[in-house]
Amino acid sequence: MTVYEISILDLLVCAVAMAIPYFISRFLKLGLERDLLVGSIRVFVQLLAVGYILDKIFAVNHAAPVFGILLVMTANAGFNAAKRAEIAHARTILMATGVIGVTTLAVCAFVFYAVIGIEPYFNPRYVIPMMGMGLNGAMNAVAIGARALDIGVRDNRERIEAALCVGATSQQAVAPIVRDSLRQALIPAINGLMTAGIVQLPGFMTGQITGGVDPQIAVRYQVVIFYMLTGIVALSSITAILLLVRRYFTSDHQLREFAAN
Protein backbone atom coordinates (compact mmCIF):
# COMPACT_ATOMS: atom_id res chain seq x y z
CA MET A 1 0.00 0.00 0.00
CA THR A 2 1.25 3.46 -0.91
CA VAL A 3 1.83 5.86 1.98
CA TYR A 4 1.51 9.41 0.70
CA GLU A 5 4.14 11.79 2.03
CA ILE A 6 3.03 15.11 3.50
CA SER A 7 5.55 17.91 3.14
CA ILE A 8 5.90 21.05 5.27
CA LEU A 9 4.32 22.97 2.38
CA ASP A 10 1.35 20.57 2.47
CA LEU A 11 0.92 21.31 6.17
CA LEU A 12 0.91 25.03 5.50
CA VAL A 13 -1.71 24.57 2.77
CA CYS A 14 -3.85 22.48 5.13
CA ALA A 15 -3.62 25.27 7.72
CA VAL A 16 -6.00 27.22 5.48
CA ALA A 17 -8.76 25.12 7.07
CA MET A 18 -8.10 26.97 10.34
CA ALA A 19 -9.46 30.11 8.67
CA ILE A 20 -12.96 28.63 9.00
CA PRO A 21 -13.21 28.67 12.83
CA TYR A 22 -11.15 31.89 12.91
CA PHE A 23 -13.61 33.87 10.78
CA ILE A 24 -16.62 32.27 12.47
CA SER A 25 -15.27 33.46 15.80
CA ARG A 26 -14.54 36.90 14.39
CA PHE A 27 -17.94 37.26 12.70
CA LEU A 28 -19.90 36.06 15.75
CA LYS A 29 -17.61 37.89 18.18
CA LEU A 30 -16.77 34.74 20.14
CA GLY A 31 -13.40 36.12 21.19
CA LEU A 32 -11.53 32.95 20.25
CA GLU A 33 -9.38 34.35 17.46
CA ARG A 34 -6.21 34.64 19.54
CA ASP A 35 -6.58 31.13 20.99
CA LEU A 36 -7.17 29.66 17.54
CA LEU A 37 -4.14 31.45 16.11
CA VAL A 38 -1.85 30.51 19.00
CA GLY A 39 -3.19 26.94 19.05
CA SER A 40 -2.58 26.55 15.31
CA ILE A 41 1.02 27.68 15.67
CA ARG A 42 1.64 25.62 18.81
CA VAL A 43 0.31 22.36 17.36
CA PHE A 44 2.47 22.89 14.26
CA VAL A 45 5.68 23.63 16.17
CA GLN A 46 5.14 21.21 19.08
CA LEU A 47 4.29 18.17 16.95
CA LEU A 48 7.11 18.78 14.49
CA ALA A 49 9.48 19.03 17.46
CA VAL A 50 8.05 15.81 18.93
CA GLY A 51 8.50 14.08 15.58
CA TYR A 52 12.15 15.13 15.50
CA ILE A 53 12.70 13.95 19.09
CA LEU A 54 11.00 10.61 18.44
CA ASP A 55 13.20 10.08 15.38
CA LYS A 56 16.27 10.43 17.59
CA ILE A 57 14.84 8.21 20.36
CA PHE A 58 13.94 5.45 17.89
CA ALA A 59 17.44 5.58 16.45
CA VAL A 60 19.10 5.31 19.89
CA ASN A 61 16.90 2.37 20.97
CA HIS A 62 17.70 2.77 24.67
CA ALA A 63 15.47 2.87 27.76
CA ALA A 64 16.84 6.12 29.29
CA PRO A 65 15.47 8.62 26.73
CA VAL A 66 12.12 6.79 26.69
CA PHE A 67 11.78 7.14 30.47
CA GLY A 68 12.96 10.75 30.25
CA ILE A 69 10.26 11.79 27.81
CA LEU A 70 7.62 9.90 29.80
CA LEU A 71 8.60 11.81 32.95
CA VAL A 72 8.23 15.12 31.12
CA MET A 73 4.85 14.07 29.73
CA THR A 74 3.64 12.93 33.17
CA ALA A 75 4.72 16.15 34.89
CA ASN A 76 3.01 18.21 32.21
CA ALA A 77 -0.18 16.14 32.51
CA GLY A 78 -0.26 16.57 36.29
CA PHE A 79 0.26 20.32 36.12
CA ASN A 80 -2.40 20.80 33.45
CA ALA A 81 -4.91 18.61 35.28
CA ALA A 82 -4.58 20.74 38.43
CA LYS A 83 -4.65 23.95 36.38
CA ARG A 84 -7.82 22.97 34.50
CA ALA A 85 -9.50 21.99 37.76
CA GLU A 86 -8.47 25.42 39.15
CA ILE A 87 -6.66 23.84 42.11
CA ALA A 88 -3.11 24.45 40.88
CA HIS A 89 -1.31 24.46 44.24
CA ALA A 90 2.00 22.66 44.79
CA ARG A 91 0.42 19.87 46.83
CA THR A 92 -2.44 19.22 44.39
CA ILE A 93 -0.11 19.35 41.40
CA LEU A 94 2.11 16.69 43.01
CA MET A 95 -0.95 14.61 43.88
CA ALA A 96 -2.35 14.87 40.35
CA THR A 97 1.03 14.02 38.81
CA GLY A 98 1.44 10.99 41.07
CA VAL A 99 -2.07 9.68 40.46
CA ILE A 100 -1.88 10.19 36.71
CA GLY A 101 1.59 8.66 36.45
CA VAL A 102 1.02 5.61 38.66
CA THR A 103 -2.40 4.66 37.30
CA THR A 104 -1.35 5.12 33.67
CA LEU A 105 1.84 3.13 34.19
CA ALA A 106 0.00 0.30 35.96
CA VAL A 107 -2.67 -0.17 33.28
CA CYS A 108 -0.27 0.36 30.36
CA ALA A 109 2.22 -2.14 31.81
CA PHE A 110 -0.54 -4.75 31.92
CA VAL A 111 -1.40 -4.03 28.27
CA PHE A 112 2.23 -3.94 27.11
CA TYR A 113 3.36 -7.18 28.73
CA ALA A 114 0.24 -9.29 29.32
CA VAL A 115 -1.69 -8.40 26.16
CA ILE A 116 0.67 -7.22 23.39
CA GLY A 117 3.94 -8.71 24.64
CA ILE A 118 6.23 -5.93 23.42
CA GLU A 119 9.97 -6.43 23.12
CA PRO A 120 12.18 -4.88 24.33
CA TYR A 121 10.27 -3.80 27.41
CA PHE A 122 10.84 -0.09 26.64
CA ASN A 123 9.95 -0.34 22.91
CA PRO A 124 9.45 3.38 22.13
CA ARG A 125 7.16 2.79 19.16
CA TYR A 126 4.58 1.33 21.54
CA VAL A 127 5.43 2.78 24.95
CA ILE A 128 5.56 6.49 24.08
CA PRO A 129 2.39 6.86 21.96
CA MET A 130 0.24 4.52 24.08
CA MET A 131 1.46 5.99 27.38
CA GLY A 132 0.82 9.41 25.86
CA MET A 133 -2.80 8.50 25.15
CA GLY A 134 -3.16 7.09 28.65
CA LEU A 135 -1.67 10.18 30.28
CA ASN A 136 -3.97 12.43 28.27
CA GLY A 137 -7.03 10.39 29.25
CA ALA A 138 -6.03 10.42 32.92
CA MET A 139 -5.30 14.16 32.80
CA ASN A 140 -8.75 14.96 31.42
CA ALA A 141 -10.50 12.62 33.84
CA VAL A 142 -8.72 14.02 36.89
CA ALA A 143 -9.40 17.60 35.76
CA ILE A 144 -13.11 16.95 35.15
CA GLY A 145 -13.58 14.95 38.34
CA ALA A 146 -11.67 17.39 40.55
CA ARG A 147 -13.51 20.39 39.13
CA ALA A 148 -16.89 18.71 39.56
CA LEU A 149 -16.00 17.81 43.14
CA ASP A 150 -14.96 21.37 43.98
CA ILE A 151 -18.13 22.86 42.49
CA GLY A 152 -20.29 20.21 44.13
CA VAL A 153 -18.87 20.78 47.61
CA ARG A 154 -19.11 24.56 47.39
CA ASP A 155 -22.63 24.56 45.94
CA ASN A 156 -23.91 22.04 48.50
CA ARG A 157 -22.11 23.28 51.58
CA GLU A 158 -25.36 23.91 53.51
CA ARG A 159 -26.59 20.38 52.87
CA ILE A 160 -23.19 18.96 53.81
CA GLU A 161 -23.09 20.95 57.04
CA ALA A 162 -26.64 19.85 57.88
CA ALA A 163 -25.65 16.21 57.40
CA LEU A 164 -22.59 16.70 59.61
CA CYS A 165 -24.75 18.29 62.31
CA VAL A 166 -26.98 15.20 62.55
CA GLY A 167 -24.02 12.86 62.97
CA ALA A 168 -22.92 11.96 59.44
CA THR A 169 -19.22 11.54 58.79
CA SER A 170 -17.55 13.66 56.13
CA GLN A 171 -17.48 10.64 53.81
CA GLN A 172 -21.20 10.07 54.22
CA ALA A 173 -22.06 13.75 53.82
CA VAL A 174 -20.15 14.12 50.58
CA ALA A 175 -20.84 10.67 49.09
CA PRO A 176 -23.48 11.85 46.53
CA ILE A 177 -21.09 14.55 45.29
CA VAL A 178 -18.26 12.05 44.98
CA ARG A 179 -20.48 9.74 42.91
CA ASP A 180 -21.59 12.59 40.65
CA SER A 181 -18.00 13.78 40.18
CA LEU A 182 -16.85 10.29 39.22
CA ARG A 183 -19.79 9.95 36.85
CA GLN A 184 -18.83 13.18 35.08
CA ALA A 185 -15.21 12.07 34.80
CA LEU A 186 -16.23 8.77 33.20
CA ILE A 187 -18.82 10.08 30.73
CA PRO A 188 -16.35 11.09 27.95
CA ALA A 189 -14.70 7.66 28.00
CA ILE A 190 -18.07 5.89 27.98
CA ASN A 191 -19.28 8.06 25.11
CA GLY A 192 -16.18 7.06 23.17
CA LEU A 193 -16.99 3.38 23.70
CA MET A 194 -20.57 3.87 22.56
CA THR A 195 -19.84 5.78 19.35
CA ALA A 196 -16.65 4.10 18.12
CA GLY A 197 -17.12 2.67 14.64
CA ILE A 198 -20.59 4.19 14.29
CA VAL A 199 -20.11 7.93 14.67
CA GLN A 200 -16.34 8.00 14.25
CA LEU A 201 -13.33 5.94 13.27
CA PRO A 202 -10.87 6.45 16.16
CA GLY A 203 -7.61 8.21 15.44
CA PHE A 204 -5.23 5.39 16.39
CA MET A 205 -7.02 2.93 14.10
CA THR A 206 -7.28 5.46 11.27
CA GLY A 207 -3.57 6.22 11.52
CA GLN A 208 -2.65 2.55 11.33
CA ILE A 209 -4.94 1.90 8.36
CA THR A 210 -3.61 4.89 6.39
CA GLY A 211 -0.12 3.66 7.30
CA GLY A 212 -0.77 0.33 5.60
CA VAL A 213 -1.69 -1.94 8.55
CA ASP A 214 -4.33 -4.61 7.92
CA PRO A 215 -7.72 -3.18 9.03
CA GLN A 216 -8.43 -6.25 11.18
CA ILE A 217 -5.19 -5.76 13.11
CA ALA A 218 -5.80 -2.02 13.39
CA VAL A 219 -9.29 -2.66 14.79
CA ARG A 220 -7.96 -5.06 17.43
CA TYR A 221 -5.36 -2.53 18.53
CA GLN A 222 -8.06 0.12 18.79
CA VAL A 223 -10.20 -2.11 20.99
CA VAL A 224 -7.18 -2.62 23.25
CA ILE A 225 -6.69 1.17 23.35
CA PHE A 226 -10.32 1.77 24.33
CA TYR A 227 -10.21 -0.79 27.13
CA MET A 228 -6.88 0.55 28.33
CA LEU A 229 -8.07 4.17 28.34
CA THR A 230 -11.32 3.38 30.12
CA GLY A 231 -9.44 1.52 32.83
CA ILE A 232 -6.99 4.39 33.24
CA VAL A 233 -9.79 6.98 33.36
CA ALA A 234 -11.73 5.05 36.00
CA LEU A 235 -8.70 4.32 38.18
CA SER A 236 -7.18 7.80 37.99
CA SER A 237 -10.44 9.69 38.55
CA ILE A 238 -11.62 7.68 41.57
CA THR A 239 -8.15 7.82 43.15
CA ALA A 240 -7.83 11.58 42.65
CA ILE A 241 -11.37 12.30 43.88
CA LEU A 242 -10.97 10.21 47.03
CA LEU A 243 -7.66 11.93 47.80
CA LEU A 244 -8.97 15.41 47.06
CA VAL A 245 -12.18 15.12 49.05
CA ARG A 246 -10.14 14.98 52.26
CA ARG A 247 -8.86 18.54 51.72
CA TYR A 248 -12.36 19.92 52.28
CA PHE A 249 -12.67 18.56 55.84
CA THR A 250 -10.75 18.73 59.09
CA SER A 251 -9.77 15.63 61.05
CA ASP A 252 -12.90 16.26 63.16
CA HIS A 253 -15.15 15.94 60.08
CA GLN A 254 -15.83 19.66 59.86
CA LEU A 255 -16.07 21.52 56.58
CA ARG A 256 -13.03 23.72 56.13
CA GLU A 257 -13.51 27.46 55.87
CA PHE A 258 -12.32 27.79 52.26
CA ALA A 259 -14.91 25.22 51.13
CA ALA A 260 -17.68 27.20 52.76
CA ASN A 261 -16.94 30.35 50.76
Image (cartoon, rainbow, N blue to C red):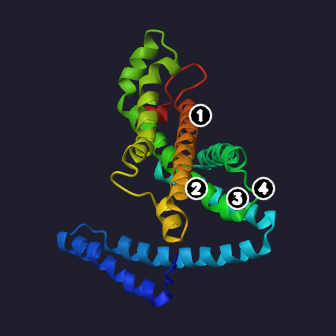
Mark toward the viewer: 1 or 2: 2
**Sequence order check: which comes first, mark 4 or mark 1?**
4
Please say whether residue 252 is visible from this viewpoint.
Answer: yes
| For residue 152, side relative to residue 134 (left or right) | left
Q: Secondary structure at mark 2?
A: helix
- Residue type pointed to by label 1: Leu
- Residue type pointed to by label 2: Ala
Which residue is the site of mark 1? 243
Mark toward the viewer: 2 or 4: 4
Which residue is the site of mark 3? 71
- Residue type pointed to by label 4: Tyr
Residue at horizontal 59 percent and vertical 35 percent from the top: 239
Mark toward the viewer: 3 or 4: 4
Q: Position of residue 243 (x, y in %)?
A: 59, 34
Q: Residues within 10 Å of mark 3 (few under 14, many from 20)?
A: some
Which residue is the site of mark 4? 121
Which residue is the site of mark 2? 77
Q: In which quarter of the view is residue 22 placed?
A: bottom left
Q: Secondary structure at mark 3?
A: helix
Q: Are marks 4 and 1 in contact (CB under 8 Å)?
A: no
